[in-house]
Image (cartoon, rainbow, N blue to C red):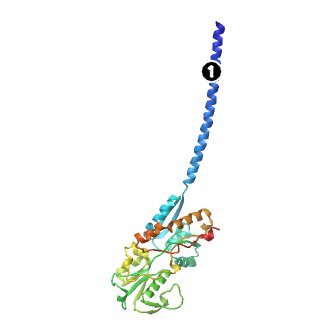
Amino acid sequence: MKKTIIAALLTIASLSVLTACGSKADASADRVQSAEEQKTSSAETTETASEAKTIDIKLGVVGSIYDDLWKSAKEKLADEGINLEIVQFSDYVTPNNALANGEIDLNSFQHQIYLQSEIDQYGYEITNIGNTFIIPLNLYSEKIKSVDELKDGDTIAVPNDPTNEGRALKVLEAANVIALKDNDNFNPTLEDIEKYNVKVEIKEIAANTIPSTLPDVTAAIINGNYALDFGIKAEDAIYKDSVLDEEQYWNLIAARTEDLSNPELLEAYDKVVEAFQSDETEKVFNDTFDGYFIKAGWDQDKLAEFRR
């Protein structure tokens, strides 16, 4: 009887040991599996974080209309991990300085001749990375309905910055108000006026203030973005700009030249240009702004030389 009891106890003890060993093995396997799952989860998290990485790009502009002009491009870029922030400036002088100093990453407010004049004057190392559009520089008036109504002694306001003034004088020449000297000066000044077909007084005024002075002059040449900001419609112009085919007057997107040697930035800026030069943007030109903006130079790849 004692032998039977002892044997039974030994059998129970053996089973207990085996069960304990099995539990340890199972627990160990569970820990290995858990560790693998954590590694997988960690890897997936890292991959997701990498995929979710965004690039922030600040784009300087002049005028609230650029919010609409860049809206579709901004949405496209967001899908590609690029957060495009529109930074507003109130004048034409500040954006290039801000770009050169690294306060913004890109700007889009100027045409080529204006950019070149800024580079010549301040030594900025800034490059055109993509053409955008050309804006007609029209003649407006609250006092007369036609250029033919201009008379001696009337006043015409023009932008006082060199490049826009030069283009404004070309518009006045095309309207037969003045005649410019035949001296091949691409960017004429008042001194280049050879003849006044109508003896008007030309007043040089800051471009951003011209719309508000329109009631005080007979007529004024107004930059398109400022005309739009003041609710002045292109169809109300008494003379519409016909100087549209000169490439130097095409607007552009500018970047610091040094940034174009950075592959990551180059790729991002390339996407910015591509996003703007789209059918959606052209639709905004035509539908929202009644064709006030005309696409120009979209077939030119300004970044090609930097991809080599």
Answer above or below: position of 72 versus 16.
below
Q: Secondary structure at mark 1?
A: helix
Quarter of image, res 283: bottom left
Asked whether residue 103 appears in the rendered view, the answer is no
Above or below — where is 303 with respect to 144? above
Report whether residue 285 is seen.
yes
Residue 20: percent from left, percent from top: 63, 24
Residue drawn at point x = 44 percent, y = 71 percent: 285
The image quadrant of residue 23 is top right
Q: Residues within 10 Å of mark 1 (few under 14, many from 20)?
A: few
Q: In the image, what residue occupies the spot 44% across and 66% down?
A: 67
Mark 1 sits on what residue? 16
Specify the amino acid type for callout 1: Ser
Front one among 242 and 125: 242
- Horizontally, is 63 left or right of 11 in the view? left
Looking at the rendering, in which quadrant would you find the N terminus? top right
User: Observer-nearest residue: 162 or 140?
Assistant: 140
Query: Where residue 163 appears, x then y in whole percent?
Result: 50, 81
Q: Where in the figure is residue 182, as x and y percent of width and height?
A: 52, 91
Q: How many marks?
A: 1
Left or right: residue 9 compared with residue 293: right
Image coordinates for residue 14, horizontal then vertical, percent: 65, 19
